Amino acid sequence: MATTGLRAALAREIRYLGGQPWDLAMLLWFPVASLVLLLWIFSSGIPTGLPIAIVDQDHSSGSRELIRRLASMRGLAVTAQPPSLEAARSAVRSGAVYGIVHIPADWDRDRLRNVSPPVVLYDNAQFSLVAGTLGGDVRASVASMAFERLVASEARFGGGFAQAAMRLNGVQADLRTLFNPSLSYEAYFAGMLLPVALHLFCVIAAVSALGREFRDRSVDAWLASAGGSLPRALIGKLAPLGLVYLLLSVGLVVTFAGWRGWPPAGSLVLWVVAIAVLMIVSVTIAIMLVGLTLNLRRALSLTGFYVATGLAFSGFSYPRAAMGEVAQWWGGLLPYTHYLPVQQGQWLGGASAGTWAHGMVPLLAFMAVPLLVGLPLLARAVRQPARWGAR
Amino acid sequence: MTLWQALVATVGSALRDRGLVIMFVAAVPIYSFFYPLPYATQSVRNVPLVVVDLDASPMSRDIVSRLSAVASVRVGGRASAIDEASGALAGGQIAGIVVVPENFSRDAARGTPTAVTVFGTGAYPVQDKAVLGSVGAVLQGVAGEVTAARLARQGTPAAALLQSARAGPAFIDQPLYNLARGYGSYVVAAVSILIVQQVMLMAIAALVGTWLEGRTGTLFGPQAVGLSTLFGAIAGFALFVFLALLYFIGFAFWFQDYPRGGNLAGAVAFAALTALTVASLGIALGAWFADRERAFQVLLATSVPFLFMGGIVIPREAMPVPINALAMLVPTTPGIFGFVKLNQMGATWSEIRPEFLNMTTLLLLYGGAAWWAVRVRRREANE
């Protein structure tokens, strides 16, 4: 009897999806298309050829050498050499270039005497990542010329250029980035955004599946198909989409680790378990949101507020340690905030199983707490037809 | 219906819908306080790193105390060996390890090449940049002092040392518009436009879907619907979008002290154009979905791709050509660029020409789509 009820509820859900192309599309095709789109957006890895303007008011062999070095940087493309800063500023405002390199008059002559005004990069800081790339590349070009001059002047103490360079580099900072050392945008953005997109899609799908029974006042037919048992009705309803999202999440891991070629530094199995738990958490959160609202539209609005904004609070770009207290506290209430370090640890960092287990504790709590909130509310509401049908 | 009647009827319908009036009136202000919360502190700070000081000299302690004075990082602990801290770096509890090698100060004094090694984590690129950048800057200062001391020993005249010490920097990286390089100033300027679009599209499409379900409202009631009715409905919905945009441009940016007010008149004019475009798209989507809740399901999931396709976070130069072409169909693409240029960068009207043309094209496209979708749905309803 128990399995018959479950199987009947399952069959009812699958029959419904078969007859409703919109719902099936929302469950399956739309998420898949979005994930492919996101992967495509970030596919180029590292930005190259960012257009800049150069205002050369020096017109010396030194300034031409600097322009040559700037043009040879992978991240930059010198697309304009306007005569004045004013003309260059307009090019920035119109979006034609992201920055201006200004080489002042007599720069080359004066720098030999250590009195030259600096080369200035004006970068458009409304484009934060771009500005960072420009700053790094232009700084490196200017520094390479300055260093050569320093070596030439140091060489007077003897030992030739090689020893002079060694003396000047006596104390250095050896800067190394571990895990994703090239800082590929694809590994960074796609790696962090695709799981949260899948998490969001899964909540939307589960909220929709559950919420539409209340919207359509079909709760009794749904319960009846499962022999009147709410747990069996829930499992029958949520199992198809749960399975779809478990498969999609495994597909995501396979895409990153296999097809895109970033094998996990930690454990593939532990990563898969973590993302599978995130999908189950998505379903339990949907149960809570529908239980709290008994209204499909409101449950979806709450999904927007609670899940869709989660990325900003998760610390994926702006670090959590830098946030104010309220933002840190709210971020702690979101499952994705806890999933992210677990994934990055297993995928890129190669964190230990102990670290993984420690990180999984809050995620497991997110499996339990929403159920404790949502199930009693649903159990009460399914016996109160007067509360169905709210839109 | 005349245009004016349709406008009044549309505004009234939006305000009377008890479920959707919150979306039309209150959701944007709520999001305007909620969404920027993580970025309110503006600059990256307190990124935790661990120091492994194998030298234990006055010079190495000096490096640590200088690091402690840098706002972007926080010396979160000491370790006696790299292995002790590497687990925390892999697990993401810390973002960097700074290793001062044995005999560092002795080698520095003798001129034997030596280096402080810094390990950052590419799993969190923003934190990685903060760690490498701040340690690099501190080390540059130390290296400069060491070099000056050596030059003095080698007999360089004091006057020459003083002159080079006083020489200004060879290079200045000067930010434009977002003068403090605020993280919030960059993110919120862009996301605010996305919030307005998504919230308003959901609200408009949901209301139009509700009209269609009930065979009622400005566009799907029993009365004849001509172009003047459609224009009235577009104008009525556009009013809410326009007010939401003005709220951000005029109040939210000011209240939260983000860069603003570059070309106010231009921004207001562009807001009117954007509002009409979003309203037209909302009507088209609502007539297509034919359902009160569908818009929420579809649009919730599109926010993330829309933001990244827009070209503010990831530059257009780094995206495939078809993605950039597709992005031009979304009002936020010219919208975010246009508003950032006008509000934050102070662009003139001629400097936002590409965005103006793109948005105008979308208005014609989605206005036509709305007209077509409404006519198809009305014909279906009458059959």
Image: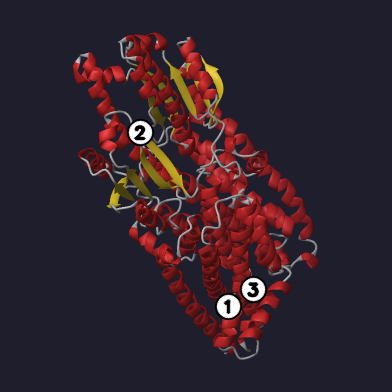
**Would you say A173 lies left or right of B292 here?**
left
Cα gap from disc 2 to disc 3, whole angstroms: 60 Å
Q: Read off the residue under disc 2.
A: B170
Name the front one of labels 3 and 1. Answer: 1
Q: Read off the residue under disc 1.
A: B234
**Would you say A370 lies left or right of B245 here?**
right
Q: Are marks 3 and 1 in contact (CB under 8 Å)?
A: no
- Of the 4 image quadrants, the one containing the C terminus of chain A is bottom right
Q: Residue at x 59, y 30 (%)?
A: A358
Instruction: Label 1, secondary structure: give it.
Output: helix
The amino acid type found where label 1 is placed reads Ile
Residue B238 higher or lower than A297, as above or below: below
The amino acid type found where label 3 is placed reads Leu
Q: Read off the residue under disc 3.
A: B207
Q: Nearer the viewer, residue B184 or A284?
A: B184
Quarter assignment of residue A387: bottom right
Chain holding disc 3? B
Q: Residue at x 40, y 18 (%)?
A: B145
Instruction: Label 2, secondary structure: give it.
Output: loop
Q: Is residue A12 visible?
A: no
Name the front one of labels 2 and 1. Answer: 2
Where is residue A89? Give x, y as percent.
Answer: 39, 54
